[in-house]
Amino acid sequence: MSEHTERRVLNGRRAQAARNDDAILASARTVFIAEPDAPIGEVARVAGVGISALYRRYPSKEALLATLCLDGLQEFVTIAQQAGELADPWEGFVQFLRGIVDADVHSLTVHLAGRFTPTPEHRELAARAGVLADAILHRAQQNGAVRPDLRNTDLTMVYEQLAAIRLGDAERIRELRRRYLDMHLAGLRTAASSYGALTGTAPTQAELGARWNRAT
């Protein structure tokens, strides 16, 4: 086999491996959000790959879950970075919330928290996500667009409430989530605070983080 042919074969194998990995991750998200206790073999079946191909990339279900959640954190960071670049603070805030809800990253939190041990990479990326989210909220509050008693941990609860909406197909789910996000946004504007302060206190970071402790 010539060197050129060997390179083509190698590139073809790499491309196939990348396609397999994309299929595995997409299928794992679908399978485990629907049923967190599903066996890893179900992911291989839905992805249309052999179980050996899956295990070569992910030696355990925990490793696969960890990768899913790391990808979700990275998506959160990307959305926050793009929203933070908008000149108008309110528009940046709205784009941020809509992007997070559309990406459905918090379904991973709702269904997978406590099912694997977060790594330092998870914690570092989560901290980065928190800094970006805080900056978007604070900018909108300082501009007078968002009510001053709102906290970013309140927004986490909003995301999780909307993640629970699962009626119909993907298009209908997206439509309904956007509908109810619009209702939330109306209540998050500064003018809405004239109806009274929010009841109770926002969840703490400790309360939110405790869910990620590995169940024993």
Image (tube, rainbow, N blue to C red):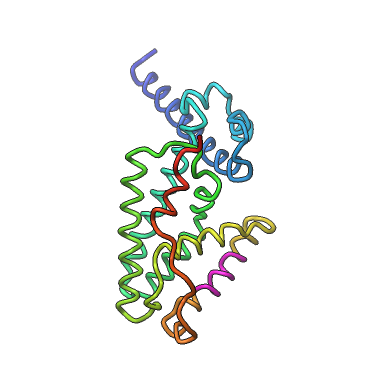
Locate residue 61, reporting x and y percent. Answer: 52, 31
Locate residue 175, reporting x and y percent. Answer: 61, 65
Q: Quadrant of the N terminus?
A: top left
Q: Main secondary structure of the magenta part?
A: helix
Locate residue 169, reporting x and y percent. Answer: 67, 56
User: Residue 82's quadrant in the figure?
Assistant: bottom left
Q: Is residue 98 above or below residue 143?
A: above
User: Residue 147's quadrant in the figure?
Assistant: bottom left
In reply to whether residue 199 is colored magenta, the answer given is no
In reply to whether residue 177 is colored magenta, the answer given is yes
Q: Is residue 55 above or below residue 159?
A: above
Q: In the picture provided, is 79 more to the left or to the right than 163?
A: left
Task: Please tell me which residue is depicted at 63% across the width and 45% down the height of the picture.
Answer: 34
Task: Please tell me which residue is depicted at 49% across the width and 85% down the height of the picture.
Answer: 195
Name of the residue lying farthest toward the front: 200
Name of the residue lying farthest toward the top: 1
Highlighted magenta segment, given as a residue range: 176-184
Q: In the picture provided, is 6 more to the left or to the right than 52?
A: left
Locate residue 122, reporting x and y percent. Answer: 37, 43
User: Residue 166's quadrant in the figure?
Assistant: bottom right
